[in-house]
Image: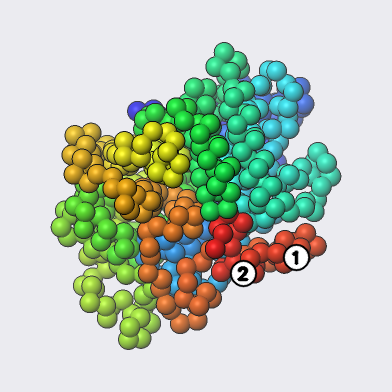
Amino acid sequence: MKTNKFNIYILVALVGILMGTSCTKDFKEINTNPVAYGPTSFDPNFLLTSAQLNYTGSIDFAYDTWRGNLIYASTMMQGFSTVVSYWAGDKYLLNEGYTAAYWGTSAVGAYIEQVRPVVDVVEFTRGNAKYANVHQVARIWRAVIMSRITDLYGDIPYSEAGQGYYKSSFTPKYDSQQAIYTDLLKEVEEATNALNASGDKVTGDVIFLGNIDKWKRFGNTLLLRLAMRLTKVDENTAKAYAQKVVGKTMINNDDNAFVTHDVSGSRVTQNRNSQVLQGDGGQENYYTKWSKTFIDLLKGANDPRLGKVAVTQLYLTDGTKLQNPAYITNPAVQKGMPNGKDLSGQAGRDIRQDASFTTFADYSSPNPGMIKKNGITFILTYAESEFLLAEAAQRWGIAGTPAPHYKEGLKAAITFLGQYDATLAITEGVAETFATANPYNAVNGLQMINTQYWLHTNTMLDFYETWCNWRRSGFPVLTPVVYPGNATNGTIPRRFPYPVEEAVKNGANQQAAAAIIPGGDKLTGRVWWDKQ
């Protein structure tokens, strides 16, 4: 298994450069005289590291992860459930500050912390043979970043995003999502094909440590995921690009793309999900649980993952953040908490009046191995790739037949858990036995594939991706929460509205984009590829 711990000194140096400060301890060679850095001496690998790290969440106390990935996406998709009152996503309430968090502000969020550094890398290395591979990796990484932003919001600043310094574009136009996807596919294909294993070393890469072969497989797997987003709106393009990557995608869990975090850099380098789920900012540790939907599906199938990803008795009271070392992993006692409940005292709403309630400690929490401060943030995995190839085979008869891909995806989705922590490892033999006993059935093939994709991305704690693929595929069929005062008429949200701040900073462009959203600029509006 690969290990790719952060070099904390590179990160501290980088943060110093970005924030206008300087540090000198223990990194003489990379920061001897930061003032002397200029166009001919600066190493863009530092900024690539920053763009990769910040994709896992804001350095400002997981600002976007807390609000976007967890408060909204995890609960809307019924991966998690909570009774924390400000977790608006669980009840489909609109908190405009939270839905805007991923986009961000002038200080935090995707545009300032992810887009700006990766665009700087792309532009700095353009046409520079010394950094040819760095340039191509940055192009791929820019596509990773921009695809998530457009998937969450729809039409967004894309072609002019991050170009203020280079083109004096301070009110960037909003590109249509259709045009964005056309360019994303082109960019990833070109950049992946241009990578050269004999070329320059990508030293700032904390995902594959500069392994170009792995980046090629990552690029082709990303291309597959981008293509499959279009199945409802442009099936011909989806099929064409899926066909292009057959035989070029990830080959096993060793190809999984993830960032391994480091505790020594405090919030800057620690795992973002862990900061929230360990209760650093509130009482999420005690009151946020795996959902009933998620646990019931695993339990009903006797899925071996249940005894690894879920534990009871992890936090025994709401008065401590200390984990109980005697937590219980027994699958038989795991219990998910229903979504849409609160602590209001109102009949039908208060979780304490629900038939499932005994104590909060009896509801299932994520296994501590999944939420370590020095744990893993998964970016893209072999299991995702195999499930998408299974769907391509089911839909169009390409990439062989669907059953082998489905089986490989299911096995990988079971065994990958060991990458979180050795205590979560499940053997190949157990995975093989389960996959053989639960074979692919073409009659309900798309439902099977995408339900497993939902389960897998939930266990990756990548609820953004869970939400995206659910909107695209419609599976699994989730029963919406109906909560008083919800903003969606009791339907599961389809997108995040544009930030209110955009109306002030980039009003004309934002208003033009908002005016053409199917369903309007609200939680029930739809992005282009989410065709009704």
Which x, y percent locates residue 419? Answer: 34, 37
> In x, y percent, where is residue 3?
40, 29
Q: Which residue is mark 2?
A: 519
Q: Distance between the Cα atoms at labels 1 and 2?
A: 15 Å
- The residue drawn where x is 83% and y is 41% is 167
Q: Nearer the viewer, residue 283 or 253?
A: 253
Q: What residue is rendered at 22% in x and 46% in y? A: 438
Q: Is residue 278 visible?
A: no
**Number of numbered labels in the structure image:** 2
The x, y position of residue 443, in whole percent, is: 31, 52
- Front position in the image: 489 or 366: 489
Q: Which mark is residue 459?
A: none
**Which image quarter: residue 263?**
top left
Residue at numbered disc 1: 511
Residue at the spot 31% in from the left edge and 76% down from the top edge: 351
Q: Seen in the image, is 433 located left or right of residue 116? A: left
Mark 1 surroundings: few (<14), some (14-19) or many (≥20) residues within 10 A = some
In terms of depth relative to the viewer, which is nearer, 369 or 164? 164
Instruction: Name which of mark 1 and mark 2 comes first in the sequence.
Output: 1
